[in-house]
Amino acid sequence: MPTAVKMDEETKLKLEELQAEIKLKTGKKVTQQEVLSRLVESVCASRSEFIDSFRDTAVSLSAEELAQFNEGMIASGVETDEEDIDGILY
């Protein structure tokens, strides 16, 4: 059962442009409902990335996560500077 979705004019214009581009490139006429359905399916496939896009700031690691990250680090006793790293990489 279709439900109305409110959107501003700019978003509506982008949806119409996407709809027109799909028709132009595929030759298939699709409804805005079909476009929105595919967009939702696509976003659900990478849900965490989409959710993170609404965060105001980057999520910092917890103390436990930092400890787990540092657990794999070792000290070789050799001091390395940027020039050394550049020489090795390039």
Image (cartoon, rainbow, N blue to C red):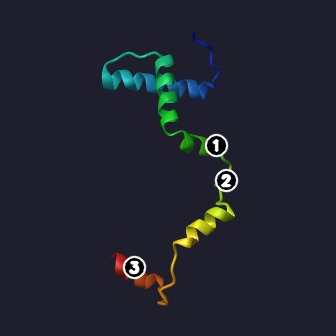
Instruction: For marks 1 and 2, give the CA distance.
Output: 9 Å
| Residue 64 coordinates in the image, percent (x, y) | 65, 63
Look at label 2 and name its amino acid: Thr
Look at label 1 and name its amino acid: Phe
Circle number at residue 9: none
Q: Are marks 1 and 2 in contact (CB under 8 Å)?
A: no
Say above or below: 29 vs 12. above
Q: Which residue is situated farthest in the top direction here?
A: 1
Kindly indicate the quadrant of the structure image that contains residue 90. Answer: bottom left
Provide the secondary structure element on which disc 3 rests.
helix
Circle number at residue 54: 1
Circle number at residue 57: 2
Q: Residues within 10 Å of mark 3 (few under 14, many from 20)?
A: few
Instruction: For marks 3 and 2, give the CA distance.
Output: 31 Å
Look at label 3 and name its amino acid: Asp
Taking the spot 56% from the left edge, 24% from the top edge, the residue there is 12
| Residue 22 coordinates in the image, percent (x, y) | 38, 24
Instruction: For marks 3 and 1, give the CA distance.
Output: 36 Å
Q: Name the residue under label 3.
A: 86
Q: Residues within 10 Å of mark 2 (few under 14, many from 20)?
A: few
Q: Residues within 10 Å of mark 1 (few under 14, many from 20)?
A: few
Provide the secondary structure element on which disc 1 rests.
loop
Label tally? 3
